[in-house]
Amino acid sequence: MARDCKIEFLIQNPPDDPHARTEKLVETLIDQLIPRIAETMDINEDELVARLMVELAHVIGVTHTPDSALSMIAMLSDAMVSGQQAVLDPESGDDEAAGPSDYDNEDWIDQCSSVRH
């Protein structure tokens, strides 16, 4: 028997700046939507995130130039290393540690193809 699920999330006070709005949306997806989807669908949140990353990587491969895709892979690797360092040494308080906003390099945006999904 099919059943429907309704999942709502709220983005409070979206900023006027498009880059800040994008960051706010990403934070909301990570903090609210993905956990709610996992809970509602009774699936492992880590598995959902991993599968989502793999699917997004496929989409990037289809819609971006090789240089652009490699740039995004480098940013992803840097973010993963930064996250691991934060887990291993959470009290370091290192202001030099990379955060999500450090990956706002927009060089790859201009290399997007016209392919749409």
Image (cartoon, rainbow, N blue to C red):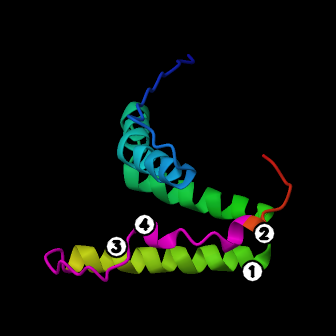
Q: Position of residue 12 (x, y in %)?
A: 38, 34
Say what amino acid the circle numbered 2 marks: Gln
- Marks 4 and 1 sit apart, C-alpha to C-alpha, by 21 Å
Magenta region: which residues? 89-109
Residue 83: image tag: 3
- Give the CA distance from mark 2 to mark 1: 8 Å
In this rendering, the count of numbered labels is: 4
Extreme right residue here? Answer: 114
Q: Where does residue 42 sit, x and y in percent of width and height?
A: 39, 36
The reply, left or right, for residue 100 in relation to residue 63 is left
Q: Looking at the image, is mark 4 or mark 1 earlier in the sequence?
A: 1
Kindly report the distance in space between the C-alpha atoms of the residues bearing marks 4 and 2. Answer: 21 Å
Residue at 56 percent across and 16 percent down: it is 1
**Badge 1 local density, few (<14 within 10 Å), some, or many (20+)?**
few
**Numbered circle sitting on residue 100:** 4
Say which residue label 1 marks: 67
Amino acid residing under circle 4: Pro
Q: Which mark is residue 111?
A: 2
Q: Earlier in the sequence, mark 3 or mark 1?
A: 1
Residue at 47%, 53% in the rendered image: 23
Query: What's the magenta bit mostly, secondary-structure-wise?
Result: loop
User: Which type of secondary structure does the marked residue at label 3 adopt?
Assistant: helix
Q: Are marks 3 and 1 in contact (CB under 8 Å)?
A: no
Q: Earlier in the sequence, mark 2 or mark 3?
A: 3
